[in-house]
Image (tube, grey):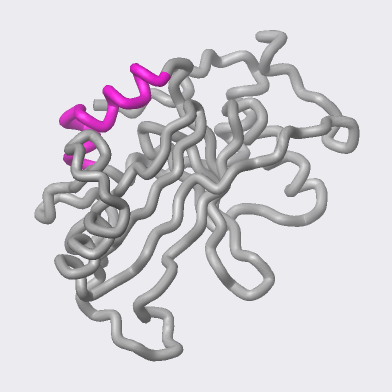
Amino acid sequence: MSPTNAAAPATEKKLKPMRIGETILRTNNFDTMKSWYSLVLGRMDPSVLITIDPTVVGSRTDIARVCFFRVHLDYPFAMVIGMFEVPEVVPSNGVRHPGMDHIMLRDSTLGELITRYEMLKAEGYVPTHSYNHGPGTSFYYKDPDGNTVELAAVNFPTEAEYLAYFKTEAYQKNFDGIRIDPDEFVAKFRSGVSQAELVRIPA
C-alpha cells in the first residue's frame, strides 16, 4: 500500500479549507450571456475562454453548448465561471430554470478529497453521483435546500499537465468524462493504485 494513500481515521484528520472553484450558470440565452461575461471579466485571452463543440457534449444530452471562463489560476486551485446552454429552461420555480446549476469546492489534492468523502460518509452523507471528468475528479452532493454542491480535486500533479488536458481530443469529445462508483474509486486509492492509473480515462 502506498503510504500517501493510507487511510487516516476520519475523526482525527484535520483538512485544509476548501476554495470555491467553479460556479456554473444554466441559461437559454447563451450568446448574450457569453458576451456579457466576456465584457465584464475583461479576459479575451483564448486560453482563458474554453468552449466545447456544441455537437459533442459527452453524456449531458440536455446541454446544447458549454463555456468556461477561467477567471483565476493558482494551481491546484482555479476559479471558473461557466455556462450550460439548456434550451428548454424557462423563468420559473421548476427544475429547468435559468440560474445556478452548481457550485464547486476544491481540495488541493485527490487524497484530501477522498478523506473528505470518508468523513462525510461517516456522518451519513453520500454523493448523488460521482465523475472522473478528466482534469479532475468530483463527488456531487445535495445541500439541505437541494442545491448541487460539487466537491472536487485535480487529477494531475502539475499545472502543465492539467492545462494540457483541456486541449486533448478526449476532452473536446467528452467534457463530462466517465461516471465512477465512489466506494470502488476510494477503495482502489486506499489499496495503493497509483493516481495516474486511477484517473486514466480509457480511450
Query: 93 and 134: which one is in front?
Result: 93
Magenta stretch bounds = 159-174
Query: In the image, is residue 169 part of the stretch drawn in magenta?
Result: yes
Magenta: main secondary structure equals: helix
Q: Position of residue 160 (x, y in %)?
A: 34, 17
Query: 195 and 179: which one is in front?
Result: 195
Left or right: where does residue 43 sit relative to residue 11? left
Q: Position of residue 126 (x, y in %)?
A: 66, 53
Left or right: where does residue 71 sit relative to residue 129? left
Look at 17% across and 38% down and name the residue there: 46
Determine the residue located farthest toward the bottom in the rendered image. Answer: 92
Determine the residue located farthest toward the right in the rendered image. Answer: 12
Look at 81% across and 52% down and name the residue there: 123
Query: In the image, is residue 75 part of the stretch drawn in magenta?
Result: no
Query: 64 and 27: which one is in front?
Result: 27
Vertical side of 30 occupied by 191: above or below? above
Left or right: where does residue 170 sit relative to residue 105? left
Q: Position of residue 35 (x, y in %)?
A: 18, 62
